[in-house]
Each structure stands twice: as C-alpha cells, then as structure tokens.
Amino acid sequence: MPGSFPSRNARYRYLQQIVSGVSDGVILIETDETIIWANETALEMHGVRTLADLGTTVPDYCGRFELRYRNGHRTAGGHTPIERVMAGETFNEVVVDVARKGEKAARWTHRIRSLVLTDDDGRRDLLVLILDDETERYHAEERFERAFNANPAPALILRLRDLTHIRVNQGFLDMTGCREDQVVGRSIYEVDILEGAARRELAIERLQEGRTVPQMEATMQLPQGGERCVIVAGQPIDVGDTRCMLFTFADLEGRRQAEAELRRSEQRFELAFRMAPVPTAIMVWKGWHVLLANDAFARESGHATDELVGQDAHALPLWADPQSTAVLDRLLRKDGRVSNLALPLQTRGGDRLDCLVSAELVEIRDQSCVLLVAQNVADRQRSKLEVADAIAAVMHDTSWFTDAVLDKLARRSAGVTDEQTSSLAELPPRAREILDLVCEGLDDGTIAERLAVARNTVRNHVASLYRRTGVDSRAKLIIWARERGVMGAPVRPRPRPRR
C-alpha cells in the first residue's frame, strides 16, 4: 500500500484525489525533506510496495537508490532530482537510470519533472516529483544501438526533419575512411551519401517524403580522395520520438576488384585465343554454328572472321566430308572430347585441307558448345610442344568465356578496338556526365552549378578521371575523350558587349 497521506488541510486531500488516478508516478515531499506520499505507480517504478520501502525522507531515499544520468555519470551528492527539487529547482525533463544501492546495473529508467507548490505568501509549501517510466523504451533503444554499432554492414541514420546525420556505425567509417565527426552533425548536402546514385532523383524524392529508398548503386566520394562504389538503401525508422531514415550500404569494392581481375583474365584469354598459332574455333554444339574463330582459323579456311561467325558449318561448308559433324557428335557424346581425329576442312576456294582435329565440350551462356582446334597436317615445322601449349592456353579455364569476352572478340572482328569502348563503359554515370561537360569546355564551378553539386565533388570526379585514363591534365583528358567519340556540346563564343 502507498504511504498514508497526512491531511493537514483540505487542499492536500484534494491533491491526493487528483494524483491517485493519474498514470504517472507522483511523489510528494515536505519542505523538511519528509516524503509524505507516493502513489502506486511511483512505488511500482521503484520495485517497492510501501512508502517505508521507498524511503520516508530524502536522505533515506538517496540511501536506498542510486541514480545515474543517461550519460553514465553518477549523480553527485546534492544533484539527484529529489535533492534538486528540495533546493527549489524546477525542471521539465531529467532522464535517469535507477538502481538499488550497490547494484551496478540499472533496473529502471525514469523521466522526471518537478513542481514547487507555494502557499498564499509565496513560500514553498509542497514539493512534487512526477515520474514517467521509460524503461522499456530505453531498453529497446539500447538494444537497437548495440545492434547498430555491432553490425559489420556499413550504416548511418539521417534525421528527416533537417536531413542531418545523427548516427554512424564503425562499418561505415571503415568503408569510407571518415572520422565520426566528419559525418555526425553534418547534413546530407555536406556528406552526400546519394552522390552518383543510379536513380538519384527517385532517392531524393523518397527521402523528402520519408518513404523507403529502394536499393540502387551509388558512387560515394571519399574524404581522402577517390571514390567507392556501393549499393545503398534507406528504411524509415523512429529513433525515440524522432523520425529518421536508416541507410545501409553494401560495399562493391570487392566486386569491382573481382571484375577487374576477371577483365584481366579475359584479356589474357582473348590474347591466347586470338594469337594461338593453330586454327581454333568455338561452335554451338546443337546445329554447329560458329560462335568465334581466331585469326589462324580464318587464315587456314580462307574465310574472313565475320564470314565465319554465326554461320552453320554445313552451310559454309566447313568440312570436306559432310559426315564430319556426325562423327564428331558421336565421339563427343561418348567421351566428351576428341583428340587428333583426321578430318579434312574445305577452304573458301573449295580446296581440301587435311587436318588433325581436337575438340572438347564447354558451357558458354548456359549452352553446350565445342572448343575445336584443327592442325594443318602439312604444317609439320611447328613442334608438338608448341601446339600443346597453345591448346592448353585456350582450354585452361572455360569460365573465361563470358559475354564480355565474346563481345570483345565480336567487336574486334568488326574492326572496333577495346580501347575505344571498354574504358568509357566502365565509367560511373556521374563521372561520365562530368566528362561530357568537361568536353564542352566548362570549368569546375560551372559544372557544379549545372549539376547542383559541390565544387569539391566535381574536382574529386575530375581527379578520378585522371587516374582512370592515365592523363595528367584537363586538355589531355579532353583529347582522350574525343578520341573515343565523346565530343561534348560545342562551346559557343560569348557575344561581345555593345558599346
């Protein structure tokens, strides 16, 4: 039961009736430090059942409970909320963790307000503490904070009211190389996490509306220079009473490195395939359509490469004996490979070319293909070891037969070099946009104004373009771009002012 309420006068009785039914905890204190009454809610918030267990005086209360402010500091003597109200201080909100004396871990979290009631002469007559139980809320927030900070996935929280970053985890700091003070407290205009986003306009629209920002690729500018390719997504959340957006990131740097290594592998394969000294071709097994053919194969057969690619071996015809594909079919179905089979090719001029054919089944674009090598029997001056090395180089890893390789070889047969296309294709959307404007002759300030970004952002992109292209000046960058077909809009001369 709550402590008995002394009925000094009718006003106290009325006050008792009022506060008994409220949902907040209420503690009444006399000016002589006597705790005269506490309602059921206040007792429950301290884990006690009677006023005697709560403490009948202010010193008694302070001897039974230990209060810590939310920053983890203990409340120094004379500065607990109950002591502050005894000094006549009124405060709107103080949030404290409450534990029993001697316990390290807090049991409750209270949000406390104070009232100082005065008599007709304006002297302090009764002191009141009003308590809200915030235990569950703060425990939930603490669990979220621990999970947020411990999550290895990069993440930050943006306050929607003013678009300011209010929290950032270690994963984000490690990914970007930023310090916490370079992010927290700064607006999205200063630390633009949507810079270079594939669907930037949609992301900004959703952010302004407080709606989910779908996953999209973005290129973030790093404080020490350079950039980071990521996948970013945003989810609306409430942090306390504050509406926020939780942004999470997936670092694509590892994928970019893997793609770069794959490109290098593809280039090595392409070179090995194209420069192999023996005729080599790749054919779709079903129908025997020529998918690729190297220079040696084109030279021996008398067909240009573009005449071979896409053609049916029967329609060319490729074999002097029409039954050759049936023979290869049977052997491939039986053993999965063919070695040194005597099969004559037919050249474009109709001549018969005696060859030793080796073939192996490979998977390309989820379809069964045949990697075929044909050695001209008459060409005996080439050593068997050289032939074996050439075949091994081509057959080393069939996983290199990617779309990129096939497209590169197809472009080469059409007379288009990789240097003219691949470097441009690898540029992020924002970098390509800035390259176009550089080619128009615009300076960094004008480009920044045109794209509504910071001038430093443009400067970082231009520096990144220097690294990507291997040039060291703006003029050389423009030349590099124009050699690859990026002309930009012509720069119009400014009209002379009239005199």
Image (tube, rainbow, N blue to C red):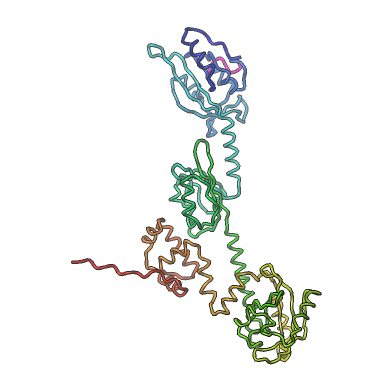
Instruction: Give percent across and percent down for residue 5.
Output: 54, 11
Locate residue 37 relative to residue 350 in the image: left or right.
Answer: left
Report the quarter where the C terminus lies.
Answer: bottom left
Foreground: 303 or 268?
303
Residue 63: % across, % down? 58, 20
Q: x, y (%) of residue 316?
A: 66, 84
Left or right: 311 in relation to 24: right
Residue nearest the observer in this picture, 426 or 344: 344
Where the N terminus falls, by quadrant? Answer: top right
Image quadrant assignment for residue 99: top right
Task: Inspect the magenta stretch and tell me whether residue 54 lies in it.
Answer: yes
Tag count: 0
> Is residue 97 one of those drawn in magenta?
no
> Could you say which quadrant of the image residue 444 lies in?
bottom left
The image shows residue 444, relative to residue 5, as above or below, that is below
Above or below residue 350? Residue 338 is above
> Does 65 appear above or below 460?
above
Q: Nearer the viewer, residue 453 or 466?
A: 453
For the point 36% across and 70% down, the residue is 490
Q: Is residue 88 left or right of residue 344?
A: left
Q: Residue at x 46, y 54 (%)?
A: 201
Q: Residue at x 60, y 46 (%)?
A: 151
Give the residues in magenta. Answer: 52-58
